[in-house]
Amino acid sequence: MPKDVGGAEEEKERLGRYPLQILAQEDTLKALEQKDFASQVTLAAILARLNMTLSALRDAITDAANPKDLKDLYDELAKLTTPISIHDSSTGAALTVSLEIGHRSFVEVWMKTSAAATFKVYGSTDNSNWRECDEIPFTGAGELNNGYWNGYKYVRVSISDANNNEIEITAS
C-alpha cells in the first residue's frame, strides 16, 4: 500500500482504481468529519439552550426597570446573613420590642425585669397578625436569655407588667 498521496495516484494509474485500503480510509475520514460536524451542531444547540437558560436566570434575578449587578446580589445576601439586634428598656412601665428579622432562622431573646412578671414572645409573617410562641414567667426580679429556631419574618417580645424592664432581640 502506498505511503503518500502521490503513491496512491500511481496505484490508481497502475490498477485503474484506488486500492480498497485507501477507499476505506477515505470513507472513515468522511464519517469522522460528519460525526465531528454533528457533534459541533449538537454542542452549538446545547450552548444556545444554556445561553437562553442563563439569560432567563439573569432576567429573573433582575428586571429591566431595576437592573442589578453581582455586587447588588452579594449585598442582598449579606443582608440575609448579617446578625441584627434591637434593645429597649422601660422604667415602671410595660414594654414591647419588635424586630423584622427577614429570613434569619435563629433568634435570641434576652429579658430582664425588676419584679414578678410574664414576658410573651410572638411571631408574625406580615407585622399585623401575631401568634404567641412562648410565655416566660418570672416569680421575682431576674433575667433570662432564650434561643429559638424561627420561621417568622417578625418577632415581638412584650411585657405588660409595669416594672423596670429590658428586652433585647437578636437574630442571625
Image (tube, rainbow, N blue to C red):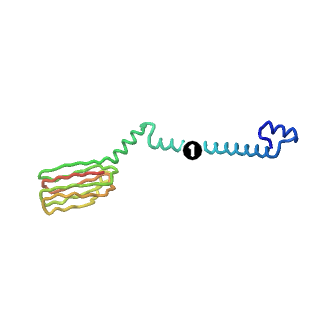
Tell me the crowding category of disc 1: few under 14, some 14 to 19, or many 20 or more residues within 10 angstroms, Cα based: few
Residue 107 relative to residue 71: left or right: left
Image location (x, y in percent) of residue 37? 67, 42
Residue 7 relative to residue 122: left or right: right
Residue drawn at 72 percent across, 45 percent down = 31
Image location (x, y in percent) of residue 138? 16, 61
Quadrant (top left, top right, bottom left, bottom right) of the N terminus: top right
Residue drawn at 35 percent across, 44 percent down = 78
Element type at mark 1: helix
Residue 116 falls in which quadrant of the image?
Answer: bottom left
Residue 4 falls in which quadrant of the image?
Answer: top right
Image location (x, y in percent) of residue 105? 33, 54
Image location (x, y in percent) of residue 47? 57, 43
- Amino acid under label 1? Arg
Q: Nearer the viewer, residue 139 or 24?
A: 24
Q: Work out whether 25 lies above or below 148.
A: above
Q: Nearer the viewer, residue 5 or 32?
A: 5
User: Count the marks: how many?
Assistant: 1
Residue 16 relative to residue 63: left or right: right
Residue drawn at 46 percent across, 43 percent down = 60
Q: Which residue is mark 1?
A: 49
Residue 64 relative to residue 41: left or right: left
